[in-house]
Every structure is written in structure tokens, then in C-alpha cells.
Amino acid sequence: MYCIYCGEKMDEGALKCPSCGEETLQAKAQSAYHRTHKEGRYSIADHTGDFAHDDQERNKGMALMSYLPILYLVPILCAKDSPVARFHASQGLLLSVVNFIVLTLGFIFSSLGRIAYVGPVLRVVWQIALLIVLLARIYLIATVLRDKVKGLPFIGNEKIFG
């Protein structure tokens, strides 16, 4: 493999030319890929470094409670000075809103269930949506247990409780 800038021979897989110090095209492509996929709006951002570690440890129970239906209010009332508790409560509220929308759509779909062929398809779509909400709850609870602070994909960057 040769450097496209100075023409010197390089090792296969090298990220920089040892002679001129320029990044290889492979290195530039990798960094562009990581920037696009890590910083995009729909990525799952890791906010662990945004919060103090002792706040995360002290409010782990509050964070777990945030992802149980209706209990997302408890961290807001009991740990209102904790940024970690507010973050997880916001995520829990967002997840509860999505859950409410899915349940509402389920009732609408059940009224359309009498239409031939449409009812069974809508019922499957509704069940898949409920499964996705359940998996999102499990994922967020697992991230709290691993001492990580992550938001929901697509909507996790929205802040409700500051």
C-alpha cells in the first residue's frame, strides 16, 4: 500500500503515513462513518459522562423506577435536584407517552378489526408495537443496571424535566 500524498510505501491497514503523517483514505472514511453514526439525531447517545458518577450511584433506584409505568413521577418528586433522576424521568415519561399512543392505536385498530383482512394485520402491527415498547423498557433498565446513561432511539434527545 502506498501513500496517495507522498507516494511512500506503508503497511497494510495503516491509518497514517509514517513519512508525511497524512491520514489514509481508509482512516478518513472510518472517522466520517463514526461521526455520522455516533452524532446523528436518531442514534442512541451515551450520556454517562454528562453526569457525576456519585449522582448516578446515589440515584440508581430512582433511575430504575423511572422506567416503570406511572412511577416516572417519583424521581421528579423525591430527587428533584438530581440531574440523573430528571434525565431518567424524562425518558420514562417519553416512553409512557409512546406506550399510551400504542394502546390508543390498539383500541382504534380493534374497531377496524371487523374489516376482512385488515383486522388481523392491524392486530399484528399493534402487538409488534407493544413488544417494541416493552423491549425499550428492558433496554433502558439494563443500561441503568450497567451504570450507563442512555436515551431512547429517535426520541431520546428530547428533554422534558430539564
Image: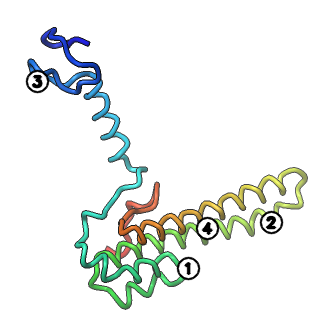
User: Which one is earlier in the sequence, the residue at label 2 or at label 4?
Assistant: 4
- Left or right? Give the position of 140 relative to 117: left
Tag 2 secondary structure? helix
Image location of residue 77, percent across then percent down: 38, 90
Q: CA distance from mark 1 to mark 4?
A: 14 Å
Q: CA distance from mark 2 to mark 4?
A: 14 Å
User: Which one is earlier in the sequence, the residue at label 2 or at label 3?
Assistant: 3
User: Which one is earlier in the sequence, the residue at label 3 or at label 1?
Assistant: 3
User: Which one is earlier in the sequence, the residue at label 3 or at label 4?
Assistant: 3
Give the quadrant of the N terminus.
top left
Depth check, front residue: 10 or 51: 10
- Dividing the picture into quadrants, the one containing residue 82 is bottom left
Tag 1 secondary structure? loop
Q: CA distance from mark 2 to mark 3?
A: 64 Å
Tag 4 secondary structure? helix
Q: Which mark is residue 69?
A: 1
Mark 2: amino acid: Ser
Mark in front: 2 vs 3 = 3
- Left or right? Give the position of 157 relative to 94: left
User: Which one is earlier in the sequence, the residue at label 1 or at label 4?
Assistant: 1
What residue did someone put label 3 on? 21
Task: Identify which residue is drawn at 26% across, 28% down.
Answer: 27
Q: Which mark is residue 110?
A: 2
> Relative to 36, is 16 above or below?
above
What residue did someone put label 4 on? 101
Give the quadrant of the C terminus.
bottom left
Task: Identify which residue is drawn at 82% across, 61% down.
Answer: 112
Depth check, front residue: 38 or 42: 38
